[in-house]
């Protein structure tokens, strides 16, 4: 049997969560506010470190959870426990809210201006307010081609780093740490953004 000290020394060091934000390029700036990627895989987060806190905001979002899952645990002054779908549409939020990671979470988010979101997808913004809804239930058929293929891929591959020649996300990521470009390449291409949408 390996000596306990030697076993402990052989364990890989835990990594810190990585968050990246990309501002849209000229082709998408009229309807997208920002693209965000969050990778907490291998971080072994516990307790309060698993919480994600968000302010109230007027933006709508499409959220892909490539690994792990997330529950909404607080909204305004209320304590709740609402699971969020693997690919979810979020409406405008009138109060701060918090979510909790369940397991290692790897996520990609596209944030839209609300009027542009309605114009693109015809979704009733009032019905989405303060909610996160399964994207397959609310997005029109012409938008659904991006939802399930990448989710299926994410369950069988651990989101390998995209090629520099094919990833629009390699263009000037902001507020980022070095590393892979997460999901922005695949999610961006499946949404058929204009070629320069990420700058």
Image: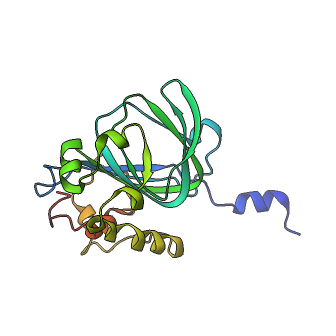
Instruction: Please state the horizontal and vertical placement of residue 148, each as a whole percent of the image.
Output: 42, 70
Above or below for 113 versus 165: above
Above or below for 18 versus 50: below
Image point 29% across, 40% down: which residue? 59
Image point 20% across, 64% down: which residue? 193
* Left or right position of 127 against 31: right
Q: Residue furthest right?
A: 1
Image point 46% across, 74% down: which residue? 153
Instruction: Please state the horizontal and vertical placement of residue 108, each as a whole percent of the image.
Output: 39, 56
Q: Is residue 32 visible?
A: no
Q: Nearer the viewer, residue 194 or 168?
A: 194
Q: Residue furthest left?
A: 26
Q: Is residue 50 visible?
A: yes
* Left or right position of 65 against 125: right
Q: Nearer the viewer, residue 15 or 3?
A: 15
Image point 43% across, 46% down: which residue? 132
Instruction: Please state the horizontal and vertical placement of residue 68, each as a whole percent of the image.
Output: 56, 58
């Amino acid at each position: 049997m390996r000596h306990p000290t030697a076993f402990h020394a052989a364990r890989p060091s835990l990594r810190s969560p990585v968050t990246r934000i990309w501002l849209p390029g000229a082709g998408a700036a009229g309807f997208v506010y920002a693209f965000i990627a969050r990778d907490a895989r291998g971080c072994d987060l516990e307790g309060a470190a698993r919480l994600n806190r968000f302010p109230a905001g007027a933006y709508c979002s499409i959220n892909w959870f490539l690994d792990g899952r997330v529950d909404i645990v607080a909204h305004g002054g209320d304590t709740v426990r609402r699971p969020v779908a693997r690919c979810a549409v979020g409406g405008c939020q009138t109060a701060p809210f918090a979510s909790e990671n369940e397991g290692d979470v790897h996520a990609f988010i596209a944030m839209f201006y609300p009027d542009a979101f309605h114009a693109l997808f015809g979704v009733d913004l009032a019905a989405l307010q303060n909610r996160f809804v399964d994207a397959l239930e609310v997005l029109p058929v012409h938008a659904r081609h991006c939802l399930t293929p990448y989710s299926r891929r994410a369950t069988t591959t651990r989101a390998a780093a995209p090629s520099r020649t094919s990833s629009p996300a390699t263009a000037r990521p902001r507020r980022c740490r070095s590393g892979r470009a997460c999901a922005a390449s695949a999610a961006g291409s499946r949404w058929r953004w204009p070629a320069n949408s990420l700058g």
